[in-house]
Amino acid sequence: MGQLVYHEWARLLALSSAAYMLWASFWAFLFRKFFWDMIGGTLGPAGIIPGSNTAPLVFITTTIPLLQIFSLLLSIVALALEWPLPMLRRTAIHRSLTLRVVLYFLTAFVGIMVYQTVDCAIYFAITSGVYVRAMMRGETMAERGGQAWSDA
Amino acid sequence: MKSAGTFLKQELVRVVRECGGGTIAYGWYSQETNKKLSGLNMLKFSVWSSRGAGLVLAFDGAMILVPMLRNIIRIVRPSLQGIIAADENIWFHRQVAYQILLWTIVHVTAHYVNFIKVEWTQIRVEAAWQIHYTQAGGITGHVMLLIMFLMYTTAHVSVRKQCFEAFWYTHHLAFFWMIGLYTHATGCFVRDSVDPDYISTFPFYSTEHCLGYESWRFTIWAGILYFGERVYREIRARRKTEIVKVLLHPSGAMELRFTKPSFKYKAGQWLFLNVPEVSKFQWHPFTISSAPEDPFVSVHIRQVGDFTKALGARLGATMAPASLPSVEKRELVGGDKGRRGDFVEVNPAMGKGMPVLRIDGPFGAPAEDVFKSEVAVLVGAGIGVTMCLRMLANPKVAADDQIYLTQRMDVDAVQNITLNDVGQEYDPLTLLRSRTLFGRPDFKQVFTSLASSIESGTYLPGREASLKTRVGVYFCGVSGVVKWVSIALTRAQRAAERSGATRENRVAKGEVEIHLRALRQGALLKGAQRTR
């Protein structure tokens, strides 16, 4: 009974994931850590000493917080897209489910690199999956107002 | 004057918040000052906040189940009346959920700092990822977080309205969340020993060195009670129930009459109804429209949502209203005042018997409460009006009621009513002595004039003798309307507060207390659901 409109639920998932990532990104600037540094790394007296295989990724997390900047920006983009910002409302960008699937998968990929954003990266991956499900069901976002989603 | 409802709401939130505030303070203090935990205290603020927030979460983890103990609330409620607005249990449940979210953010943020500090200082020889993903505290924590991500989003009103199942099934993840909560500390993270001190007997860690709060010893009782309640509800719902009659009223409302010998109720209570054939797990709340002395139990169901329509189709209540007796032919059924004769009995399609019906309940406050207040305003929205009619038909009531008709009707029907209206002793629509008024009522106006006429002593003369006049506002129907009513009520109360003259009057003539109570909690809950 009842039809769940997947992309409307996915919007709530995306907002939660993005809010989480925004918050976690701030902390990721303060406590910088590449999450996967245990691969090839060894546990020393001041924490994990990364191996040479992860060195470049450790560099863009700890020396320059590049991944954190990305995750911060991506979470803001996600919030702007989902809330949405008034100028985005009902534009082609706002109505694109494909854009979301790709964007959130990318966000998940970036997020999973950083210690603090691993969980919300997983949430973004789930969100992306729910948007895929919405597309498979043939749901579309209405051009204006209403909930004109099809149920093919 | 603040309405008791608003007051209670604010009080309840304050209690939860202050318990939260007090608890975090205690948790923080007990961690910071514990000499045994001086190792952990090297982590400073992060560990103090994680421990403080953790204790609040343990408390909230128990509190979130308390408002869901429907049967226990029903039993306890009469003694709590006036102290706790037990009817607003789902509202309270939500407030606790918001608290849990807040303290989870604090707790998790603090732990992310804790574990990275443990790794960097090596006060324990382990890496942050190991604490997160290989130890009981970390694993259960991440699982609970993921569950919350799914539960909170599907509990949003838009999802509940669209697809109640999506909410209902997902919300049962709470079972695993609770398991996570009770076992969160089994990894012995808070300890004064180098390694976790596991033992071979329950609870498998020694409380000598594992110095967590042991909060599960207290919080688990709410979980056990809730589990017991669910089992009991399941058993009770399966007791013998038989549909005896299905009546189709004009406008498509159907009346379901059934017998269930084990079912005892009082007027004004409501029940949950389930028809496995229509939907296996959907339980829908309906107000009981029969009187306890009737030989059957009845509910009026308007076919508007997909569940009620599917139920109507299954029961054969799909006839077009045109084939029903017309307005002119309406007559009072002899001796059955308050009931009309304009319904037809319907039956399921050929070859199909009556479906299995399961009933859970009764729940809610008996309508007898209505008679405790001197002035009662009954707001019955939509099908909720049946409830009010039942009560007004009670001989104990000196009814001075106004019924508003807001449904869109065609000109003929209105004509008909108007014609019938002239010179009749009973109102043609409701069969009550009072007249039906048309249009949406201005509730603020209604309440304000009511309050001022009580204060001036023109309404119910003689009431001044007692100091207080209780005006109970009772509501039954869809949630949209309850919002207007409560907004109007608040405004009327504020207006009364502002006028100084009225206050003096109140001192002289006695106080007017206005309460808003949802008569049928199902009504509020209903708004959260898609179908009705």
Image (cartoon, coloured by chain):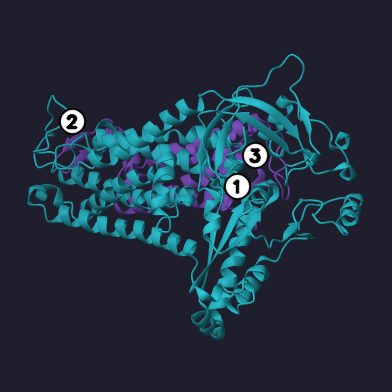
Chain colours: A purple, B cyan
Q: Mark 3 against mark 2, which lies toward the viewer?
A: 3
Question: Do callouts 1 and 3 point to residues on the same chain?
Answer: yes
Task: Name the spot of residue B490 as percent of width and height, x first.
Answer: 56, 68
Q: CA distance from mark 3 to mark 2?
A: 45 Å
Q: Are marks 2 and 1 in contact (CB under 8 Å)?
A: no
B284 vs A47, left or right, is: right
Question: Do callouts 3 and 2 point to residues on the same chain?
Answer: yes
Q: CA distance from mark 1 to mark 3?
A: 9 Å
Residue under numbered circle 2? B203
- Looking at marks 2 and 1 on the same chain, the residue that comes earlier in the sequence is marked by 2
Subunit under mark 1? B
| Structural crowding at the residue carrying mark 2, measured as other residues with C-alpha within 10 Å and reported as few (<14), some (14–19) or many (≥20) | few
| Structural crowding at the residue carrying mark 1, measured as other residues with C-alpha within 10 Å and reported as few (<14), some (14–19) or many (≥20) | some
Residue under numbered circle 3? B531
Amino acid found under the numbered disc labelled 2:
Pro
Amino acid found under the numbered disc labelled 3:
Thr
The tag on residue B527 is 1
